[in-house]
Amino acid sequence: MRLLFLAVLRPHTGNAVTAQRVRAHLEAAGHVCVLKDAFDFESPSEIANLILAENCEAALALHLYRGGRLLQGHRIPFGIIFGGTDVNEDANQKEKNTVMRRVLEEARFAVAFTESMKEMAQAQWPHAKGKIYVQSQGIATTPNAAFNWNTFLQRSEINQSADNLHVFLLICGLRQVKDPLYLVGAFSEWHQEEPSVYLVIVGPEVDPVFTREVKAKVKRASGVRLIGEMPQGDLHAVVKNCFAVVNSSVSEGMSAAILEAMDLEVPVLARNIPGNAAVVKHEVTGLLFSTPQVLNYSILVFIKYRGP
């Protein structure tokens, strides 16, 4: 089958990574997947022309609002994959919620990555209960074998021996929902007490205004570094070499960074929000924290028992 797949494809973001994974699964199953960036289109009429031009027989959208709204009114069947933004943010806006309800009325099926996401979607749109299913993400990590950890440390302006460092990695696009500033003050204080502890924030500059705020605060914080996006293989290598991966998001659907860290057998420290709690089992597959102070204790435990 020839499928049109709409997703937000901003480079080096979780959405883009997820879209590529879904496409790989579809193509492995024998389908032809025409992947397009939903932000390149403004109306369903543009999608109608694309469907004709690409001779698509069915369609799929990642995000009920961002992609799904563009699939309304066409003759081909379509399904949607919920994103965290759908149930955590867009559902709270009346106009968007109405559009999303109408999309679900037309969709043949809807996929949530976790049971908690499914429950939230069913509570918002009870008429769609019978068509919402759960399917976890498939993860395949491929660290770049040629990656040099010391080069990464130099790029991060960390001038210490790699043998004694405790580098915590926060992977996120610079936008408010990821809340990268939540832990900056705490890590800066911890670095002053324990100079081997660093927080490195890695990700693209998604929100220009917020990015300026992040850069200004990080510049004043000791022990905190900020670098731009990285190729996926290099990023996986960074994760493999770091002490632990941190997530401080206000909301998540299913964090690709957390799943990749788990696949690479790297410890995970995640903010205790529904999307993270659906993936991380506290003190079993990672640690959940509700405040920077709780994370402070977790770091001390990690350093004491895991060692350099």
Image (cartoon, rainbow, N blue to C red):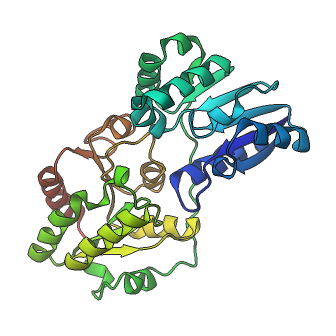
Q: From this viewpoint, is residue 98 visible?
A: yes
Of 149 and 111, nearer the camera is 111
Of 294 and 122, nearer the camera is 122
16 lies left or right of 86: right
What residue appears at the point 58 percent right and 40 percent down from the top-left corner? 66
Return the x and y of residue 67 as percentages of the image width and height. 63, 39
Of 139 and 45, nearer the camera is 45
What residue appears at the point 14 percent right and 50 percent down from the top-left corner? 294
65 lies left or right of 60: left
What residue appears at the point 72 percent right and 49 percent down from the top-left corner? 36
234 lies left or right of 43: left
Looking at the rendering, in which quadrant would you find the N terminus?
A: top right
123 lies left or right of 23: left
Q: From this viewpoint, is residue 134 visible?
A: no
In which image quadrant can residue 180 be found? Answer: bottom left
Q: Is residue 22 above or below residue 225?
A: above
Return the x and y of residue 50 as percentages of the image width and height. 83, 43
Q: Is residue 77 above or below residue 243?
A: above
Of 268 and 63, nearer the camera is 63
Looking at the rendering, in which quadrant would you find the C terminus?
A: bottom left
Q: Is residue 22 above or below residue 278?
A: below
Return the x and y of residue 57 as percentages of the image width and height. 86, 31
What residue appears at the point 55 percent right and 66 percent down from the top-left corner? 143
Extreme residue in the left direction: 193
